[in-house]
Image: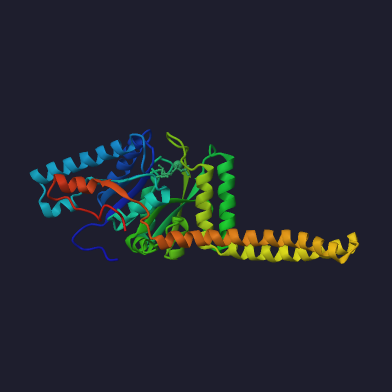
Amino acid sequence: MPVPPRRRPMLSVVAPAWNEEAVLPTFHDALMRVLTTVQDEFDTEIVYVDDGSDDATPVILGQLATDDVTMRGARSASEVSASSLACASGSTNIRFIRLSRNFGHQAALTAGLEHARGDVVISMDADLQHPPAVIRELLARWREGYEVVVTLRRDHRSLGIFKRLTSRLFYFAMRNMSGMDIRPSAADFRLLSRKSLDALLKMPERHRFLRGMVHWLGLPTAEVTFTAPPRFAGKSKFTLVRMVRLARDGLLSFSRVPLHAALLMAGAMLLTSLIGATTAWIFCRPESPVSWLILTLIVGGHLAGGAVWIALVAFSEYLARIHEQVLGRPLYVIETTSDSLAAASTPLGRNTRSAVAA
Ligand code: UDP
Ligand code: MG
């Protein structure tokens, strides 16, 4: 999409945060330092999404956004004309979206992406495991003409063997089951041009596996490798259960292999039941045809029943997804945004979309 000539391109950084009070102030400072170095080229904004934290995360983010609104209000009153405030350079617009509860990382990220106004949008974690300094490299690749710049995580030695192994296993399964070559260690730290973001936001699926969805777009993509340091503070939110859920969403959204495998298994079990019954008939030599029939029914019935169950589980996984999609509930619900705060306190604030996302 051509950049309107009246202004410089805008860079948005989207960072979801859930219970990150211990790391947010440090992350924010580090991010601001990097954004300052690109402000000769870009107008910049940060879109923080609080994913229903129950620690001081919303207070910290609310304060950052309020300070920003106050500073902009003071500036506009004293020196900057109303029409040029949105283009004011040299400072970063800090925006904040608070979700009503914890909707999960992919939904929180989607909320931030939907509200980002940039011509270039970068998503990253708020725990300093995605080093802000890499932003400059992402922008360099974007300037070369790429619509998408993905990052590949070179794991730090301190990353547990369990996380490393499960991640490799997942990407192996993904590559073989979906046929999509999503690189191992792909992170949700990526740059999207406005064109690729608009295309991504047109994808309506509820169970979002953004890495796969971005890959599916097929737009020109560059890769940047970075070393993920250990968490600066706080704990990883991706427990085993959450990792399994994300992997399941990825596989079921992009692969029909579980369905085919269930049908294959059902076929294999039926065959086994036939072989079992025949073997029993040959070797056990039941005295009467009735006991033979009973034996056949027991062996065959059990195996065929097992086969049906397997197929049923696979079908119901897909059915549950269709059901949730048909319900059409929003992916997330917004409790407050800093934009409403800005609208209330300065005549220049712009309201974003409605409180409840479509
Ligand atoms: N996060 C979130 N909602 C969640 C889980 C995580 O917004 O339900 C955020 C979290 O605050 C962090 C990012 O997503 O900014 C990545 O989470 P985390 O660092 O725990 O994941 P890991 O690096 O261990 O994979
Ligand atoms: Mg992390």
The answer to whether residue 176 of the structure is visible from this angle is: no
The answer to whether residue 335 of the structure is visible from this angle is: yes
Query: Which residue sits furthest left?
Result: 78
Asked whether 194 or 301 is in front, the reply is 301
Q: Is residue 296 left or right of residue 194?
A: right
Q: Where is the N terminus found, in terms of image quarters?
A: bottom left
Residue 217 at x, y percent in the picture: 43, 65
Asked whether 232 or 345 is in front, the reply is 345
Asked whether 87 or 20 is in front, the reply is 20
Residue 167 at x, y percent in the picture: 55, 48
Asked whether 348 or 41 is in front, the reply is 348
Question: Where 269 falls versus 163 (above or below)?
Answer: below
Question: Where 328 falls versus 242 (above or below)?
Answer: below
Q: Where is the C terminus found, in terms of image quarters?
A: bottom left
Residue 114: quarter of image = bottom left
Q: Quadrant of ligand 1?
A: top left
Residue 137 at x, y percent in the picture: 39, 51
* Rendered residue at 89%/59% (across/down): 284
Q: Is residue 46 left or right of residue 105?
A: left
Question: Where 249 falls versus 129 (above or below)?
Answer: below
Residue 6 at x, y percent in the picture: 18, 61
* Rendered residue at 9%/44% (across/down): 77
